[in-house]
Image (spheres, helix red, strand yellow):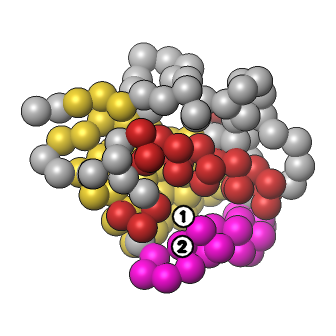
Amino acid sequence: MKQTISTDQAPKAIGPYSQAVTHGGLVYLSGQIPLDPASGTIVEGDIAAQTGRVLENLKAVLAAAGSSLENVLKTTVYLKDMGEFAKMNEVYGSYFSSNPPARSTVEVARLPRDARVEIDVVAIAG
């Protein structure tokens, strides 16, 4: 049975979607952008700061689903500028230092609220 996941430790959904949905032993997280959960605004700083905020948001949603970054199977990273890949990758690697998930990274024309990075994940639930 499908179950939606929601937590106030990550930014609230800004549209008709859930922060995450679990089904069949997996948790599917909607893309997170670098919004501060308390203020709802994009964090200040470079791609490293924004990537860190995105990953912290993802950690919070995973925790609400009873999961963690260690259970992530696949990520998709959306970058506004592929020229920032190395800096994003350095921060990303610090969160997935061992047994990293599969990943796709693509450059996109624009992200919600003009963010520089968005990441979504699929993980093992609970």
Determine if the magenta segment contains residue 95: yes
Badge 2 is on which residue? 96
- As drawn, is 74 to the left or to the right of 52? left
Q: Quadrant of residue 3?
A: top left
Q: Residue at x 56, y 79 (%)?
A: 97
Task: Between residue 104 and residue 43, name the one nearer to us.
Answer: 43
> What's the distance in space between the residues labelled 1 and 2, CA to CA?
15 Å
- As drawn, is 28 to the left or to the right of 7? left
Would you place residue 1 above or below residue 94 in this image? above
Question: Residue 125 at x, y = what percent?
Answer: 27, 51
Q: Residues within 10 Å of mark 1 (few under 14, many from 20)?
A: some
Question: Residue 81 at x, y = what percent?
Answer: 74, 57
Read off the magenta span: 82-100
Q: What element does badge 2 sit on?
A: loop
The amino acid at mark 1 is Thr
Q: What element does badge 1 sit on?
A: strand
Q: Residue at x 42, y 39 (%)?
A: 64
The amino acid at mark 2 is Phe
If the image is split into quadrants, where does the N terminus sit?
top left
**Nearest to viewer (mark 1 / mark 2):** 2
Question: Residue 51 at x, y = what percent?
Answer: 70, 55
- Magenta stretch, main secondary structure, is helix
Would you place residue 26 above or below residue 19 in this image? below
Would you place residue 9 above or below residue 118 in this image? above
Task: Between residue 5 and residue 109, name the one nearer to us.
Answer: 5
Q: Residues within 10 Å of mark 2 (few under 14, many from 20)?
A: few
Badge 1 is on which residue? 105
Q: Which mark is residue 93?
A: none
Q: Residue at x 80, y 54 (%)?
A: 49
Q: Is residue 125 something one can see in this rendering? A: yes
